[in-house]
Amino acid sequence: MKTTAIVVALAAAAAWMFAAPPAWASDEKEHAELAKALKDAKVPLERGLSASAKEGKPISAKYEVEDGKLQLSVYTMKGDKFSEVIVDHKTGKVAKTEPITSGDDLAAAEAQREAMAKAKRSLDAAASAAAKENKGFRVVSVMPALKDGHPVADVTLVKGEEWKTVSETLE
């Protein structure tokens, strides 16, 4: 009887362990997919920030693979309204703008607004500085946050298969 219980417990543990890959494995897969897709991108993220500015103040930006396609997504705010601006990664022109009104996207935009309200430096300046300090790397995302009450931008960069995130002050 005890042996059966142990075998069942071990089988359940093995099923749980192998049911989903660990978080780092999915990050590696996403990184590999994004790095491959970025080869088609002609527009630096910094240019996407500039292009999106006519839709509002940029409060974050990232390259991502959405539904199997590369896109440059910039969150903007105008007054108390938020938008997601998709910038064409080949031309640098705004492809579409959608309001952000609910869910995780709204929560993220509100947190980014709070960080940017204390910022004296733009995300474009932070991303450009990170790119300049990390020769050969490409900026993949720039996300503002408050750390110990101070606004910073976490800038993720890639060169080939090497990834790094650096923190740039927004003060």
Image (cartoon, grey):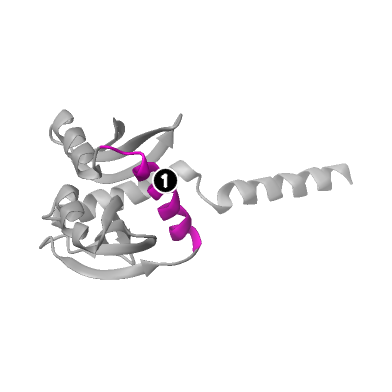
> Does residue 160 appear anywhere in the picture?
no
Q: Is residue 70 above or below residue 6?
A: below
Task: Choose between 137 and 45: the one closer to the eye.
Answer: 45
125 lies left or right of 3: left
Identify the residue at image location x=19%, y=62%: 54
From the image, tell me which residue sits under label 1: 114
- Tell me which residue sits at (30%, 57%) in the image: 76
Give the left or right position of residue 67, taking residue 14 as reference.
left
Q: In the picture provided, is 109 more to the left or to the right than 46?
A: right
Q: How many marks?
A: 1
Residue 51 percent across, percent down from the top left: 16, 58
View extreme (front): residue: 79
Please rate how many residues cluster around mark 1, counting C-alpha atoms within 10 Å: few if below 14, some from 14 to 19, many from 20: some
What's drawn in magenta, residue-wise? 103-120
Q: Position of residue 145 (x, y in %)?
A: 40, 40
Q: Residue 95 in the image: state x and y as whole percent.
A: 20, 69
Q: Seen from this angle, which residue lies furthest right?
A: 1
Q: Nearer the viewer, residue 16 or 90?
A: 90
Q: Main secondary structure of the magenta part?
A: helix
**Image quarter for residue 66?**
bottom left
